[in-house]
Amino acid sequence: MVERRRVEVLIDEPLLPALVELAQAAGVSRYTLLPALGGAGAYGRWRDDQLSGATGKVMFLAITTRAAADAFVERLEPLLDSHNLMLLSSDVEVVRGPRFG
């Protein structure tokens, strides 16, 4: 088992290209995107509008080194409030460490 960092970001789908650029600049090159169907937060309930995609959200998930995760989080911090991002970061153990570098 090898220790890595898991970083998850809930983001509005139109902002995804900018998020991916920030991730790559921080050394995070491998990630998974998960559709988010709905939820409730500080601004109330939300639900993805499949027709227009106007409120579509995506969960960006990456497992990477601590250094890359820290650099990514540092780049995201100024955007948390202005873009209403939800950011989670935690330690995880993976079996094939080199695949999550």
Image (cartoon, rainbow, N blue to C red):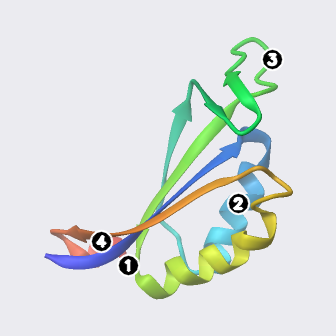
Q: Are marks 2 and 4 in contact (CB under 8 Å)?
A: no
Name which of mark 3 and mark 4 comes first in the sequence: 3
Q: Is residue 59 above or below residue 2?
A: above
- Total number of numbered discs in the rendering: 4
Seen from this angle, which residue lies furthest right? 82
| Residue to which mark 1 is pinned | 101
Q: Examine the image and state in which quarter residue 9 appears.
A: bottom right
SS at badge 2: helix
SS at badge 1: loop
Instruction: Tell me the kind of residue under disc 1.
Output: Gly
Instruction: Tell me the kind of residue under disc 4.
Output: Arg
Q: Are marks 4 and 1 in contact (CB under 8 Å)?
A: yes
Q: Are marks 1 and 3 in contact (CB under 8 Å)?
A: no
Q: Considering depth in this image, is 99 or 43 the residue closer to the camera?
A: 43
Q: Residues within 10 Å of mark 2 (few under 14, many from 20)?
A: some
Q: Residue at x 73, y 41 (%)?
A: 12
Q: CA distance from mark 2 to mark 4?
A: 21 Å
| Residue to which mark 4 is pinned | 99
Q: Examine the image and state in which quarter residue 18 appears.
A: bottom right
Q: Residue at x 72, y 72 (%)?
A: 77
Q: CA distance from mark 3 to mark 2?
A: 21 Å
Residue 57 screen position, x and y as percent: 66, 35
Q: Is residue 8 above or below residue 6?
A: above
| Residue to which mark 3 is pinned | 52
Residue 63 screen position, x and y as percent: 40, 66
Name which of mark 3 and mark 2 comes first in the sequence: 2
| Residue to which mark 2 is pinned | 19
Q: Residues within 10 Å of mark 3 (few under 14, many from 20)?
A: few
In this rendering, would 20 be left or right of 99?
A: right
Q: Residue at x 19, y 71 (%)?
A: 96
Q: Considering depth in this image, is 90 or 25 the residue closer to the camera?
A: 90
Name the image quarter holding the C terminus.
bottom left
